[in-house]
Amino acid sequence: MVQINKSENGLDSLDIAILTHLQEDGRKSFKDIAEEQGVSSSTITNRYNRLVNEGYLRIFAHIDPYRVGFKTPAFIGVKVQAGYLEKVASKLAELTEADYVAIVSGNYDVDVTLSCKDSEHLLDVIQRIQKIKGVVDTQSTIALKIVKFNQANVSLLTEFS
């Protein structure tokens, strides 16, 4: 059975175990998770619903961009004029092609990960980005081959606490 202690992020060891199981196999049954954790299925169902309702967990299909036709993934560093950071980041987040948008430190102010069908599509998106008020400069990097594409491994929370 899992030891239950709440951490500063509001998750306990059972929550982390549930998230870890779902990361390994998103279709794993609550019954199987419950048996492995030594709790009832209803406990797993209740915890799952809380994790979803509180925003710890979102359910979506994780597709392989190459296999479905996005042959030109790219990373764009965006330099922003002072006073426009939040506005530019919000506009970038509205791009349908944007998979990830983060305000960052370093040479650029915002990092954007894009999924584009081909180089023409990417050029169109870059031109749209450069027209956003407050964008000063962009730096584009095209991914030639993605070796690993994953999310944060939640099981690390228990290993390094």
Image (spheres, helix red, strand yellow):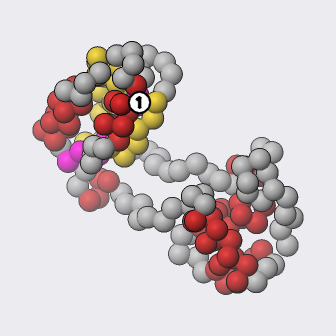
Q: Is residue 53 magenta?
A: no
Is any part of residue 24 visible from this angle?
no
Q: Nearer the viewer, residue 151 or 133?
A: 133
Dot 1 crowding, Cα within 10 Å, few <14, some 14–19, many 20+: few
Is residue 138 toward the left or the right of residue 155 in the image?
left
Predominant SS along the magenta part: strand
Is residue 6 toward the left or the right of residue 66 in the image?
right
Residue shown at the point (62%, 51%) measured from the top left: 153
Q: Nearer the viewer, residue 60 or 150?
A: 60
Q: Is residue 136 above or below residue 13?
A: above
Q: Residue furthest left?
A: 120
**Dot 1 amino acid type:** Glu
> Residue 127 at x, y = what percent?
17, 30
Residue shown at the point (83%, 68%) measured from the top left: 2
Name the image quarter holding residue 91.
Answer: top left
Name the image quarter holding residue 121.
Answer: top left
> Residue 61 at x, y = what percent?
41, 65
Q: Nearer the viewer, residue 73 or 133?
A: 133
Quarter the N terminus occupies: bottom right
Residue shown at the point (77%, 74%) measured from the top left: 37
> Residue 95 at x, y = what percent?
27, 43
The residues colored magenta run: 110-117
> Residue 66 at x, y = what percent?
29, 53
Report the label total. 1
Residue where numbered disc 1 is placed: 86
Q: Is residue 112 magenta?
A: yes
Is residue 98 toward the left or the right of residue 33 in the image?
left
